[in-house]
Structures are given as structure tokens and as C-alpha cells.
Image (tube, rainbow, N blue to C red):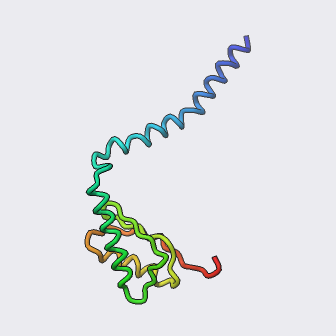
Amino acid sequence: MKTPHAVTCFVFAGCVALMPNVHAQTANAMPVASNPGAGSGSATQADKKLARDVRKALSRAPNFNVSNVFVKARGGVVTLSGSVPDGPQIEQAAEVAMSVPGVTSVSNHLSLYTKGY
């Protein structure tokens, strides 16, 4: 009689273990369906243009080294990543990016470049 009880416990434990995976799949699938503009070429082109405009503004900023800075844009949100040689350039990059028309916010992930790495 203990065997059916053990099987029931085993099946229950397996279902509980799989529940987070099922939930995660459902949650990940929803944003795709709720984003009607996904895949439209115009948004992508606008984002690319905004990223180019920000990079151009950074390259024109006085005493700013843009060589290791990467710029991405999505819906007005600009993400800066990479490294700069001087600490003050991290804040300068965010200020310059915010000054570009079309930028609504800046996510600054720049770090200080360390020689030897």
C-alpha cells in the first residue's frame, strides 16, 4: 500500500517542480502578443537614426573620447555602454545624450577604462 502513496508523492513533486517553467513560458510569450508595433521597420529606423545622432553629438563634445562607446536607442531611451578613459566623461556622455532631440531618458552603463585589460 505504500507504493501508490509514494507514486502519488513523486507525481505531485514533479508537477510542483515543473510549474515555474510553465509560468515563465507564459509570461515570456505575452509581451510579443501585446506589442502591436513589433517588427515594424519605421521604429527600427527611427531608433537607428537616434543612436547615430547621439553618437555624432558625443563625437563633437569637447574632450570626449567616443572610440569605445556604444550607443543603442529604443523608443527614445538611449543606452550607453563601453568605456571611457576619464571619470568625468561618464557624466558628460549622459548630459550630451540627453541634449539630443528625441532622447527621453539615458541608461548610462559606461565604465572607466583601465589600462592593461
Check the image and name the residue furthest to the right.
2
Check the image and name the residue furthest to the bottom.
63
Drawn side of residue 44 relative to residue 5, left or right: left
Drawn side of residue 35 relative to residue 82, left or right: left
Q: Residue 45, image x and y in percent? A: 29, 61
In this rendering, the count of numbered labels is 0
Between 31 and 46, the one lying in front of the other is 46
Q: Residue 107, image x and y in percent? A: 41, 67
Quadrant for the N terminus, please: top right
Q: Residue 49, image x and y in percent? A: 30, 67
Residue at the spot 34% in from the left edge and 71% down from the top edge: 52
- Compared with 20, 108 (above or below) is below
Quarter assignment of residue 55: bottom left
Between 37 and 6, the one lying in front of the other is 37
Drawn side of residue 37 relative to residue 55, left or right: left
Residue at the spot 29% in from the left edge and 75% down from the top edge: 100
Q: Residue 110, image x and y in percent? A: 48, 73
- Compared with 86, 94 (above or below) is above
Check the image and name the residue furthest to the top.
1
Between 117 and 24, the one lying in front of the other is 117
